[in-house]
Every structure is written in structure tokens, then in C-alpha cells.
Amino acid sequence: MSKKTTETTAAPEGEVKTFLSLTDLKPAKGSVKAKLRVGRGRASGAGKTANRGHNGEGQRSGRSRKRGFEGGQMPGYRRMPKINGFELVNPRQWLELNVEDLEQILLPEENELTYDLLLTGGLMKIKHDGIRVLGKGEVKRKITVEAHYVTPSARQKIEAAGGSIRLIGPAEAAEA
């Protein structure tokens, strides 16, 4: 076996510099503990039952508990929704329009409902994150709708009347 060696060189002012090697590195004193060896007799402090207690589910071999198990008590992750509920940190506020509302919003000569039109018309407030078109009611004329989301029934009714739908994303709405 080779001995541990550290190189020393003379510094310009007469100081001695020492270089460490990987073999010199040790963990801090007290940071490494020996693994507890269970079931090795009474004197070890972890003998007989090997720190598993006496009878019961946890004492038997092969027992596995899922995360969050609280001994049969209703676990915290299942209790929480019943207590006060959950509030969304940043809820989305949508302007929801039904198909029957589209004809009331637009003037008789207009046939296009856009994001800008709703903003300038005062229907779209700053607190709204976008437009959702829902399928309640009927539409009788050809309308082009610009929205963030359109339900399948609303899409069917608008297209049956000869209209079209243009979906816009959040980035496009921010530019407007």
C-alpha cells in the first residue's frame, strides 16, 4: 500500500503551502452515525421486537403503508377539502356569452363580434381574462365570432347559421 502524501512547496515569503488530496477529505466529526442494527439482543436496545412494537399490522413482515396513512383515521389530504374548501390563488374570470346574446350585442348592420368590439363597447371589463361562447339559445344570422373558447353546441349553432369562429389565444388578447 502506498502512504498518504501531501506535497509541500516553499512560498516566496518563506511560508509552507500544503496541498490536499482526495484521500485527506473526511466527514465532519459527529456527522456520520453507524446504522442501527435491530434484533441483535436485549443489550443493543433494539432487540426482541426490533423496534416494531408488539402485536399489530406494523409488527408483521411484508406490511407496507401508503404515504399519508394515519392509522385508519381519515388522512389529512382527504379531510382538507371538507374544511373551508380550496380557493384558487389566481382564478380566471371569463366573460360568458350565450349564442342568444350575440344578436343583442351586435347592431343589425354588424356581422362580426371581436375582442376589440367588446372592449370598446364596455362589455369587456379589465377583470375579464377572455371570452367564452356558450350554446344557450339560437342565432338567426351569419356572424363571425372571435373568442377564447366556444362550446361544441355553440359552434354547431353558429356554423349552421352560416357564421364562422376564430379562436384567439391569451397573447393575441393582450395585444388588443
Image (cartoon, helix red, strand yellow):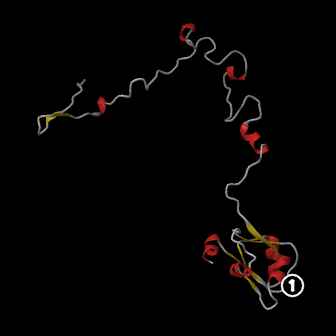
Question: Measuring 77% from the left and 31% from the top, which residue is drawn there?
Answer: 73
Q: Position of residue 64 (x, y in %)?
A: 67, 29
> In the shown orientation, is residue 124 left or right of residue 156?
left
Label tally? 1
Quarter of the picture containing the N terminus is: top left
10 Å crowding of disc 1: few (<14), some (14-19), many (20+): some
Foreground pick, 32 / 14: 14
Question: Horizontal placement of 147 versus 99: left or right?
Answer: left
- Above or below 131: residue 15: above
Q: Nearer the viewer, residue 15 or 154?
A: 15
In this image, 128 relative to 171: left or right? Answer: right
Name which quarter of the figure residue 99 lies in.
bottom right
Where is residue 152 drawn, in percent x and y? 79, 71
Q: Quadrant of the C terminus?
A: bottom right
Residue type pointed to by label 1: Lys
Residue most extreme to the right: 137
For residue 32, above or below residue 163: above
Q: Quadrant of residue 49?
A: top right
Nearest the camera: 92 or 164?
92
| Residue at image point 70% right, 63% down | 92
Residue beneath disc 1 = 140
- In the rendered view, tell whether residue 106 sits above or below residue 11: below
Image point (29%, 29%), residue name: 24
Position of residue 79 measured from the top left corner of the image (x, y, whole percent): 76, 39
Answer with the quarter of the image where residue 137 lies.
bottom right
Vertical comparison of 18 with 149: above or below? above
x and y percentages locating residue 41 in the rendered image:
56, 9
Q: Is residue 120 left or right of residue 82?
A: left
